[in-house]
Amino acid sequence: MTADQLPAPAPAASRAGAGADPADAAGPDGRVPLHRPGLEPPALAAGTVPGHVACVMDGNGRWANARGLPRTEGHRVGEATMMDVIAGAVEIGVEELSVYAFSTENWRRSPAEVRFLMGFTRTVLRAQTDDLLEWGVRVRWVGREPRLWKSVLSEVRRSERITAGNERMVLNMCLNYGGRAEIADAARAIALDVEAGRLKASAVNDKTVQRYLYAPTMRDVDLFIRTGGEQRTSNFLMWSSAYAELYFSDLPWPEFDRTELWRACQAYAHRDRRFGGAVDAVAGQ
Ligand code: IPE
Ligand code: IPE
Ligand code: MG
């Protein structure tokens, strides 16, 4: 069954009319509620909820430009989408959610956009940590330190400290994250440990590499979602997504929401994951 054939989740209240504002996910106080009245996650068969969902939150800039707005307005509206998707992930029972907020390649953007993204990330973390705490979400920064603004790093560290006791869902904030950088950093650390005699070169295997990743306890990604219409992974969680199910949405991130996340989860629940294995199932027998 394809995503197109699946029953659509109940429409978001904010989508009821044409031209509804995606920022409606937030109430008048600017906060997104954990539960949105009238919206229930679909009931998925036991064991078919993806444990780890990764989101490439793409399409902000094009969404804004198409409306005659600067790219930064797309990022601004994307904040409410992110909170709505986090809430929807908690509601449906996802245990780990990774969001790609800034890649190691995003430094190539204009200095003004980079400055905006750094400052905005800091503001979002400051504004949303209390709600994340209340929702049972534990924040974890995933990325590399060089170049990342010190003030952003200390803000995400603050969110980590505040939410450290939460157990309902882990939120990996991937900030200054790149999949190749992560694997290269792990390879360098492994080589240094081998050189120092702390590790035997002949004992290095995939479990060793996992231990040297930015977040060694990160579980494998089950469902990898990218919004914005592009069908590529753009260097996100290369190691952990080796066997992830890929789901591409044409909606720009500001128009995505928890019901779209649930639609992706429904599609995931019907995927046949084989991990390289195979079963003989001859037709007609
Ligand atoms: C993704 O949206 C957000 C970040 C990279 C931070 P984009 O800014 O890439 O928006 P598009 O893809 O150019 O529309
Ligand atoms: C991926 O989107 C990075 C984030 C969403 C943070 P990009 O917009 O940077 O990726 P490309 O350039 O389209 O591959
Ligand atoms: Mg993009």
Image (tube, rainbow, N blue to C red):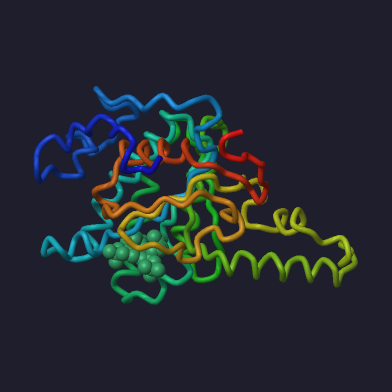
* View extreme (front): residue: 284
Is residue 117 something that shows in the picture? no
Count of numbered labels shown in the rendering: 0
Q: Position of residue 85 (x, y in %)?
A: 36, 40
Q: Nearer the viewer, residue 121 or 256?
A: 256
In the rendered image of this protein, does residue 192 appear above or below residue 26? below
For residue 90, side relative to residue 166 (left or right):
left
Instruction: Tell me: residue 163, above or below residue 144.
Output: above
The quarter of the rendering in which ligand 1 is drawn is: bottom left
Residue 59 shown left or right of residue 159 in the figure: left
* Residue appearing at x 37%, y 36% in the figure: 262
Q: Is residue 113 visible?
A: yes
Residue 273 lies left or right of residue 64; in this view the side is right
Q: Quadrant of the C terminus?
A: top right
Relative to 232, is 51 above or below?
A: above
| Vertical placement of residue 205 versus 279, above or below | below
Q: Residue at position x 54%, y 60% from top?
A: 143
Q: Residue at x 56, y 31 (%)?
A: 167
The picture quadrant where one finds residue 101 is: bottom left
In percent of width and height, residue 240 lies at 60, 54
Q: Quadrant of the N terminus?
A: top left
The residue nearer to you, when weighing 44 against 96, is 44
Give residue 157's position: percent from left, percent from top. Answer: 52, 50
Residue visible at 62% across and 52% down in the picture: 215
Side (left or right) of 252 relative to 162 = left
Where's residue 38, x and y in %? 24, 22
